[in-house]
Image (cartoon, rainbow, N blue to C red):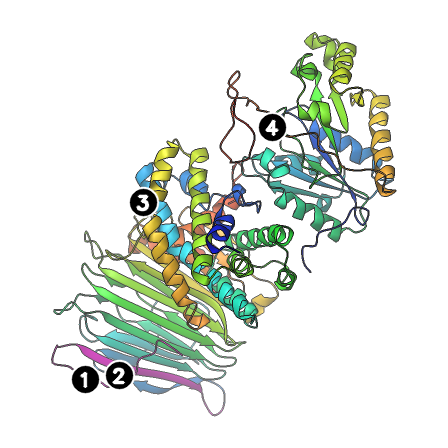
Amino acid sequence: MTDTINQPGARSLRLGVAGPVGTGKSSVIAAICRNLRDEFQLGVITNDIYTDEDARFLKSAGVLPEERIRAVETGSCPHTAIRDDVTMNLIAVEDMERDFAPLDIVLVESGGDNLTATFSPALVDAQLFVLDVAGGGDVARKGGPGISGADLLVINKIDLGEHVDVDVDRMVAEAQEARNGGPVLALSRKRPETVEKLCDWVRQMQRTYAAGGHIPKDPGPMAPHHHAHDDDHRHGHGHGHGHSHD
Amino acid sequence: MSGSLHPDTAVKSTGAMFAHAVLACALSHDGRKSVVSTLRSDGPLVLRQCNPKGPEPLIHKRRDIARASLAAGTAGPIGGDRYALDVHVGAGSTLVLNEVSAMLVLPGVGGGQSRMSITITVEAGATFVWWAEPIIAAHRCNHRHDVRIALADDARLVLREEMLLGRHGETPGDFTSRLRITRGGSALYDQQLGFGPSAAGWNSAAVLGGRRAVGSIIAVEPDWVQTPPAALPYDTHAALTPLAGPGVAIGAVARDSLDLRRLLTQGLNTLGPPWAI
Amino acid sequence: MGQQAALLLLADGRLPAGGYAHSGGLEPAVRAGRVTDMAGLEAFLIGRAATAGLIAAAFAAVACQRMARGDLTDLDALETELDARIPSPELRKVSRDLGRQLRRAMQAIHPHGIYAKLGPAPHQPIVMGVAAAVLGLDPHRAALAILHENNAGAAAAAAKVMRVDPFDVHAILARMTAQLDHLARSAAQAADGPLADLPAPGAPLSDIAAEHHRRSDVRLFAS
């Protein structure tokens, strides 16, 4: 038994789910699992900043058997774990694929970070980027590699739009513009038809991937990014990965 | 086995002591009890058969086993001394070794290193219980303690080791202690502890954290190959940890000897019978 | 391969092998209130290097030497000897997790048939030693690589779990260079002797703290 380097086609579709803290990545994954678990063999890897909170959430939600949900601890560097140094996640995905072979889809949830963290194509075949309306209607317009380059942009919690003064249609239109017409999905777990659209997208992606017709693409290198704790100040920060300073 | 010394008993002109004591036990001819077959004291290392001394794990004052105690006949070891003790527990027999009092390790007049080498062999189906008293590393001592235990695959062992960093209110001299246990010839447990002015970082948060007493209980039970006890950090300064083989190490770092004894006993008792005392 | 540059490659914290997720026991030591200031941090790093660091260095040196000789027959015994020197099951697991990750990374970066033969989850120092030999490094440099990587990794974690000036943290690393050189030489020497005599300096509080950390509900680092 060794850690092999799998070739595409011989393994599951590896689907990344990224996005800022609190936008609903875990609930998007829960929805996918709940609705697709009878059609596909699924596994989930969560990445957490503190301990294994997200894995516990998904386990308690009962969307998959517990052993198919595993946590990777990222040492407070969630973006490093999906981008610069994917080894831990890669091994977690490969272990999952080996332990439950054959799996159709492994979902990898990034630790909630910021607008610039995207998955390396070395780790996932396709990725969702999740925003929510509560984060502000102008977030999509601001762009960034996740928003502009992910295979699918999800704008979540659209049922809250009226409560937070966000025009959902406009936000979706602006997101489409930022993505040069790439797919944008307005989602609310309270509107089953939107969840069904999400599942259709995943089905389509899995079919394309299994047929060898999907080439993983990179949303693009990280732009200078800012953290929640320093609102205006753009900077590179000290993990040694090579994004530019201002 | 490396580390064993077999010096002739002698008192050199420097005043240093060389001593080599031997203890062995075997199953009696009828197979019903264990008997001490060799009891060779030497100089300051005085071995005597004895009765149960306080609570003991695993054996619980049974009368059909062999029991001996080790008494240091003089103060020491002191710098320059070379002590050796060989213990042999014959197939199927059970031996308890305890100690009369704590061992105080002192500096010698000439400032040389004192050494104590203990070599223990526990044969097939045998059980060895070593319920030692603390070793106290006095100020300016320079001591090397070396214990090598070779267990047969189905031998049992429980031992306690306690080290105190100086007598009351003093800082310890240089002290290193190594305890290596093999089982069926393969390494099971191998830990060295070093402290004193010549050692680096021992008083740090990574090693002893400024505390003055450190010790462990090691228990080896062949049946644990199937179901080892679970790890249990039962105190901020103590944990029970299952080894990679069928044994556990209960480690504690304490304020003083009483605190250490309390923590180690607490850890042992989490194993339940027959280990608890 | 150029020896000096290959050493830097292997010792670099940016080598994508997952080391960034570990604090080398610093986070648990800080949370337990045992490291509170820079002096405590320096003592911690020195104590850790002299114990777990020396063990890792010696085992990396042995693995490197055996690989260079093309004789890995005592690899299983080496794993067993290392297990015997790590009482905490949590720390044994961390060492094996990091070993798997390093193996996974090196197999992708600079492939070699030996990596597939190291067993399901080899210890990190053993993979490091083998990787060093594959890169043409000698046992002394293998020891140096793991000493530096482990030490710098724990030091880097200080910025996240303590209130520290990062310059002060690196000042500690600068002061420790002579100690690491000394430990690496000892480790390389030990590699020439029997496995049973390899260094075994224990660190009781590190073992105890690692077991507490695994059970802690809120932690930044995996270890």
Give the residue pinned by disc 2. Answer: B7
Give the residue pinned by disc 3. Answer: C175
Q: Nearer the viewer, residue A92 or C135?
A: C135
Residue type at mark 3 is: Arg
Are labels 2 and 1 assigned to the same chain? Answer: yes
Residue type at mark 2 is: Pro
Are labels 1 and 3 assigned to the same chain? Answer: no
- Across and down, in percent, residue A147 comes to 70, 23
C7 part of magenta stretch: no
Instruction: Please state if A104 lies on the left or on the right of C168 as rendered.
Output: right
Question: Which residue shows up at 55% across the image and 27% down it?
Answer: A244
Instruction: Please state if A90 lies on the left or on the right of B162 as rendered.
Output: right
Residue type at mark 4 is: Asp
Residue type at mark 1 is: Ala
Local crowd size for mark 2, using a 10 Å CA cut-off: few (<14), some (14–19), many (≥20): few
Mark 1–mark 3 Cα distance, whole angstroms, equals 47 Å
Chain identity of mark 2: B
Which region of the structure is painted magenta?
Answer: B1-30
Q: Are marks 4 and 3 in contact (CB under 8 Å)?
A: no
- Across and down, in percent, residue B197 comes to 23, 55
Q: Nearer the viewer, residue A25 or B244?
A: A25
Local crowd size for mark 4, using a 10 Å CA cut-off: few (<14), some (14–19), many (≥20): many
- In the rendered structure, find residue A113 and report the number of the disc placed on it: 4
- In the rendered structure, find residue B10 and report the number of the disc placed on it: 1
Q: Nearer the viewer, residue A135 or C175?
A: C175
Instruction: Please state if A226 lies on the left or on the right of C39 as rendered.
Output: right
